[in-house]
Amino acid sequence: MPAQPRTQRPWAAIAAVTALTLPLGSIYAFSVFLKPIEVELGIPRSALSFVFGLATVGFTVGMNLAPMLYRLASPAVLIMINTVIAALGIEMASRANGLAMLLLGYSVVFGVAGGTIFIILQQAVNLLVRSRTGLLNGYVLGLYPMGAMIAAPLFGWSNEHHGYRTTLTGLAVALLVFGIASVWLTVHAGSILPARSAVQHDAQVERHTAITIRLCIVFFLAAAAGLTVLSQAVGIIAAYGGATAMALWATTGITAVIACGRVSGGWLVDRFMVPFVSAGAQIVALTGTVILSVWPAPETAVLALVLIGAGYGLVSGSTAGAVAVYWPKTMYGTIASRVYIAWCVAAVTLPVLAGHLFDLTGGYHVTILIAGCGNLLGCVMALGLPRAKMGQFIRSAA
């Protein structure tokens, strides 16, 4: 008897990536742990900032490792194994008595496993969903800040009442629970990963590295400004004379704006050409830097950071959608993992430089100017992206 076709349920694949990406997005809420860890373990703030920076590197390594694992097991098995590893990493961090164990557990073990899970889930859902792929991938990226918005108040409450170690243990348990749910949904969805032959068949697509590089640069220039806002919004608003309460509420609002921007950026790619969406997003962020440079004040600082965050979110969503536009579905995880390297580089460049410039100048004026120049360059680079699908370039080249 011929093999029966596998039943595929795209909605279940979307639910699977939602269930597990939300707790993984708690990485953006790491700042909630800074003060309690600093007090209990005596680790300086600069070293704890390195924990977050190295975690972004760990996530990027895991993202690029994931495509190498496709042929080893089913997506459900790979997700379960890496979920257990990620939970063990968080539990190791909860028991850390020094910086080394914290780095190993949170940044390396949790980071690498989390990045691997993300790409496997994103690749699986891209193979099942056949329409509105821009909106889909913008939504998937938007789950990270959404997860942070949910995690931050919960972590803060738990830290205050039970201590940060219990909070981290709770996160490990949550990862296991949502991991099991995600595995069940992945099986129910009929999710698969690209066969090795399919990846080899699409190898000709990989040779178009110029587009990959340009997409990385566009993403990097927006992410450098956006991640600076995410990591130092409170300090920036305070430097321009804003009250602490204003800064805290603005930080929460900026995270929400970034999440909405990612979904919107992907949605726009389904309707308009990628270069115009990406260039427009860079202009939104550039507008924020111009406003703050010309009218420095607490209120304009909030508005400017919201615009920079919105631009970053829109570029993130449009970039994720662009990968689906330019490359075949079987290549999504491979190409996306390479593009996300730009996010990692952005996290350890301008945000770090911003802190150094603040120490030198006592303000963020120079940082804002650098971010604005980056957005202007990003707009120019975005307009050079292709206005047609990658398949047309392959046929014309042949």
Image (cartoon, helix red, strand yellow):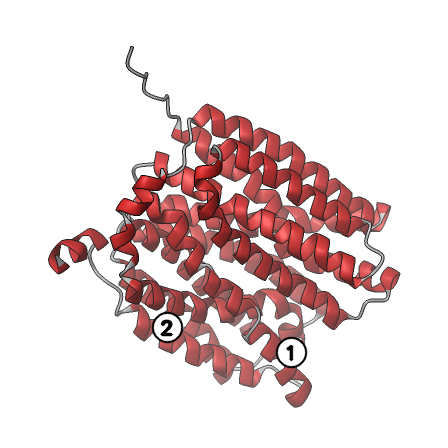
In the visual, does 351 lie left or right of 202?
right
For badge 2, the amino acid type reads Gly
Q: Which residue appears at 41% of the width and 33% of the height?
A: 192
Q: Which residue appears at 45% of the width and 29% of the height?
A: 12
Q: Quadrant of the N terminus?
A: top left
For badge 1, the amino acid type reads Gly
Gap in angstroms between the C-alphas marked 1 and 2: 23 Å
Specify the label residue 46 is tagged with. none
Find disc 1 in the rendering and name its residue: 355
Q: Is residue 228 in sight in this rendering? A: yes
Find disc 2 in the rendering and name its residue: 378
Q: Nearer the viewer, residue 68 or 16?
A: 68
In the visual, does 151 lie left or right of 195?
right
Q: Which residue appears at 62% of the width and 39% of the height?
A: 83
Instruction: Find residue 179 and report its horizontal and vertical position in percent.
Output: 60, 35
Instruction: Find residue 334 and report its horizontal and vertical position in percent.
Output: 40, 51
Residue 374 in the image: above or below residue 79: below
Instruction: Find residue 145 and report its horizontal and vertical position in percent.
Output: 56, 52
Q: Say which element carries label 2.
A: helix
Q: Say which element carries label 1.
A: helix
